[in-house]
Image (cartoon, helix red, strand yellow):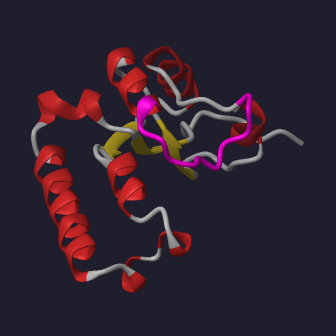
Amino acid sequence: MSKLVDCTNPGGLHVYSEPINFCQALRSFRMMIPVKTDATPDERPLERGEIEIVRGYLPDLQVVPFHFLGRLHRFLHSSKAGQLEFAPKVKRWLSNGIAATDALIRQIAPLHFLAGYAVLHGHVPSTHKVAS
């Protein structure tokens, strides 16, 4: 993280989309849903402590959670490369229902710990010196 910040001008914006894990029990449940993931063996979601490390570099860091039911969506569309447009109508309706439910959950702040992904964004402090 420090190398990325060192290459950024003061006030520069950093934006990341990362898997997150704020609820270990839910993570265990998500891992039981049999879908293929694209992660390498040593990858894992960020936890709260790691978010705070990032906040040390980007003090105004905002965390915008999303993807509460993402594994269910991928489970529905496990065939034909997961492409929604090739799915039967019923699967498309279910997928749209999952997306709508996800959007509703996203609006309820106390449920943010249930998210599977987050967009993190913040600015490099104006006092930061760019590495030469």
Residue 20 placement: quadrant: top left
> In the rendering, at what x and y percent does residue 51 appear?
48, 25
Residue 74 placement: quadrant: bottom left
> In the rendering, at what x and y percent does residue 36 appear?
57, 49
Quarter of the image where the N terminus is located: top right
Q: Is residue 109 left or right of residue 49?
A: left
> In the rendering, at what x and y percent does residue 14 appear?
56, 49
Residue 41 is inside the magenta segment:
yes
**What span is colored magenta in the figure?**
32-42
Identified at 49% across, 39% down, the residue is 19
Identified at 73% across, 28% down, the residue is 42
Q: Residue furthest bottom?
A: 85
Residue 94 is inside the magenta segment:
no
Residue 113 placement: quadrant: top left
> In the rendering, at what x and y percent does residue 21 appear?
43, 26
Q: Is residue 116 left or right of residue 112?
A: right
Q: Is residue 111 left or right of residue 41?
A: left
Q: Is residue 127 left or right of residue 103?
A: right
Camera-nearest residue between 74 and 40: 74
Q: Is residue 127 above or below residue 53?
A: below
Quarter of the image where the C terminus is located: top right
Majority secondary structure of magenta residues: loop
Identified at 23% across, 82% down, the residue is 89
Identified at 33% across, 44% down, the residue is 64
Count of residue discs: 0
Camera-nearest residue between 116 and 78: 78
